[in-house]
Amino acid sequence: MKLKKNIASLLTAIAVTATVTPVMAYEAGDIIVRGRIISVNPQDDSNNVSINGVSQAGSGATVNSDIMPELDFTYMLDPHWGLELILAYTEHEVDARGTLGALNQIAETKVLPPTLTLQYHFSPSSNIRPYIGAGINYTYFFDSEVKGALDTAGSDLDIDDSWGLAAQAGVDVDINDTWFVNFDVKYIDIDAEAHIKNGADIKVDIDVDPLVWGIGIGRTF
């Protein structure tokens, strides 16, 4: 109950602040810079794990969440339309599940997912400026390692790069005539095709498809 009251008080304070601060209107040529803390929450689904070409019925893999900082840049094409590029990386554990669940963690990887979206800003001259966006994502997996019981001498993990679509919604709320608070959520289509070699030949395809929740601050240049 106390947490709900605190959240309600915070939202009320933001709303009150937004009504009394000077308007920060977006214009063509503006560059908007935001710094966020993001929570990457995979909505994952996988096929069966294949070992030496044999599908393991009832098996699969799941990807854990991570929280990291993010930096993004938006270039305003006109007061309503802008292009946003996000820059961040996250680290994720991969766990076996189902009939192979006893293996627990089987891999770890870092993810660099630059995402470009075209945004529409509904109220570019208001203190509260909601927006939606859609675009494309490229995901690069690096520093990938085999972990746990599958980590034997000479083991190797390769995860193919991924291309997919992205969608977002968010809002900028002015603090003053220079700074604003930002709330943002994205859905990103990411497919991870993982291949482990450790004497055996192990493959699994995971639809990672994370929801990315973000909160931060920004300003316009």
Image: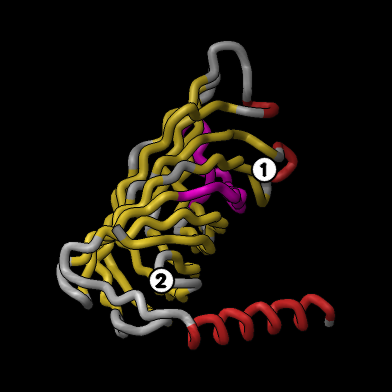
Does any portion of residue 106 appear in the rendered image?
Answer: yes
Query: Is 185 left or right of 11, judged from the image as shown?
Result: left
User: Which one is in front, 38 or 160?
Assistant: 38
The residue most toward the top is 153
Residue denoted by label 1: 100
> Image height check: is 83 above or below 157?
below
Q: Quadrant of residue 169?
A: bottom left
What label sits on residue 112 in the rendered view?
none
> In front: mark 2 or mark 1?
2
Query: Is 197 left or right of 137, judged from the image as shown?
Result: right
> Image height check: is 149 above or below 71?
above
Percent x, y of residue 215: 53, 63
Q: Residue at x 45, y 37 (%)?
A: 194
Mark 1: give few (<14), some (14-19) or many (20+) Cα within 10 Å: some
Percent x, y of residue 210: 48, 59
Secondary structure beneath dot 1 equals loop
Q: How is the image coloured?
A: secondary structure
Q: Residue at x 27, y 62 (%)?
A: 117
User: Which one is in front, 171 or 14?
Assistant: 14
Percent x, y of residue 217: 49, 61
Image quadrant holding the C terminus, namely bottom left
Residue denoted by label 2: 177
- Labels in figure, total: 2
Secondary structure beneath dot 2 equals loop
Mark 2: give few (<14), some (14-19) or many (20+) Cα within 10 Å: some
> Image height check: is 155 above or below 126?
above
Judge whether residue 8 is colored magenta.
Answer: no
**Residue range (magenta):** 47-70
Q: Residue at x 42, y 50 (%)?
A: 71
